[in-house]
Image: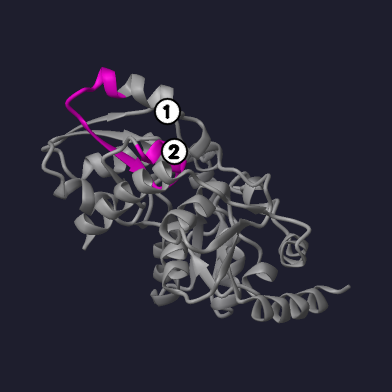
């Protein structure tokens, strides 16, 4: 079968089975073309919860599929490729979190959306990269334990010096490898390009950016900007998507290692096989996890309005 033939069959089967397909922005273009919704992890889960479809296939990583199940407990949710995990979401477990909470007993625990649902059950509020500053600023507590990404946490902390922050020594293994040397090399090669980076990057990289924001924020900024050239400091799929969206502009990757193999492991055939009933994994969560993680996420919605 060709890519086009597989895509056509996926479109037919998802309609027949009343299934919507969610594709994180880090997926390949061939997957985005069969998806009903494309975006960041939390935004995808919200879209699924608003949909009337009976089932959902998440083309992303496990914590994203879990978030989707938490927000749509009555729907069947599948992770297209069961091996697709997120190293950052998996680097801190409940035991480790409890040790941190004991060390910082009077701190509000703020969980980045890139955490497991189980971990969210013992956190005070959840945040996304685009809502973290607003939500942390609205917390009554002036002491915040931010998990698991210290780079995003420090970026948030810089925006509110009146509050005290503590961090977990984790982070995204892809964004964290980018260095100032990569920035120097990219700027030398493309002197007229603006540098757009994700706040999961190191502080010294973020400080040199022309724009700092979430994946969706970076894409929207590039689309609307009058500038014609951009260096993209987040997962390299975004370079490809922006090239399709804005063929009259030029986009360059900040660094080759900014490629998430956990995202790339999902293929078009994974979606096909999931719809055929011979692939994917249905996400099942205990009621206490759905309730606990749901409380954490709802608090984010309340504070973020």
**Which residue extends farthest right?**
1
Q: Is residue 17 above or below residue 217?
A: below
Q: Which residues are magenta?
A: 101-121
Disc 1 target residue: 94
Of residues 92 and 136, the one nearer the viewer is 92
> Residue 80, position in %: x, y?
66, 57
> Residue 85, position in %: x, y?
60, 43
Q: Residue at x 33, y 35 (%)?
A: 122
Of residues 180 and 12, the one nearer the viewer is 12
Contact flag, marks 1 and 2 (Cβ < 8 Å): yes
Number of residues whose C-alpha sits closer than 10 Å to that of mark 2, classed few (under 14), some (14–19) or many (20 or more): some
Q: Residue at x 21, y 23 (%)?
A: 105
Residue 16 counted in the magenta span: no
Q: Is residue 77 left or right of residue 115?
A: right
Q: Is residue 231 above or below residue 163?
A: below
Q: Quadrant of the N terminus?
A: bottom right
Disc 2 target residue: 118
Mark 2: secondary structure: helix
Residue 118 counted in the magenta span: yes
Number of residues whose C-alpha sits closer than 10 Å to that of mark 1, classed few (under 14), some (14–19) or many (20 or more): some
Q: Is residue 276 above or below residue 14?
A: above
Identify the image's colour scheme: rainbow, by chain, secondary structure or one colour: one colour
Q: Residue at x 52, y 41 (%)?
A: 178
């Amino acid at each position: 079968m060709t890519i086009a033939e597989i895509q056509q069959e996926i479109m037919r089967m998802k309609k027949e089975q009343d299934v919507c397909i969610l594709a994180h922005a880090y997926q390949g273009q061939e997957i985005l073309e069969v998806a009903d919704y494309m975006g960041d992890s939390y935004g995808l889960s919200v879209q699924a919860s608003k949909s009337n479809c009976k089932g959902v296939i998440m083309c992303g990583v496990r914590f994203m599929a879990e978030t989707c199940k938490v927000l749509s407990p009555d729907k069947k949710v599948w992770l297209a490729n069961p091996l697709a995990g997120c190293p950052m979401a998996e680097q801190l477990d409940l035991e480790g979190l409890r040790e941190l909470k004991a060390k910082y007993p009077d701190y509000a625990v703020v969980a980045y959306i890139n955490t497991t649902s189980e971990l969210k059950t013992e956190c005070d509020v959840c945040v996304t990269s685009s809502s973290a500053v607003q939500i942390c600023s609205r917390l009554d507590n002036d002491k915040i334990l931010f998990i698991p990404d210290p780079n995003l946490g420090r970026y948030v902390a810089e925006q509110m010096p009146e509050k005290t922050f503590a961090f977990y020594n984790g982070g995204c293994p892809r964004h964290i490898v980018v260095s100032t040397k990569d920035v120097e090399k990219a700027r030398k090669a493309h002197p007229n390009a603006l540098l757009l980076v994700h706040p999961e990057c190191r502080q010294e990289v973020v400080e040199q950016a022309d724009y700092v924001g979430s994946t969706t924020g970076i894409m929207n900024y590039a689309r609307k900007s009058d500038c014609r050239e951009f260096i993209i400091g987040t997962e390299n799929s975004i370079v490809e998507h922006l090239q399709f969206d804005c063929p009259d502009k030029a986009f360059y990757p900040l660094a080759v290692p900014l490629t998430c193999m956990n995202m790339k492991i999902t293929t078009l055939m994974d979606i096909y096989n999931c719809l055929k009933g011979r692939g994917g994994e249905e996400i099942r969560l205990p009621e206490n996890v759905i309730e606990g993680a749901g409380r954490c996420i709802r608090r984010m919605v309340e504070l973020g309005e």
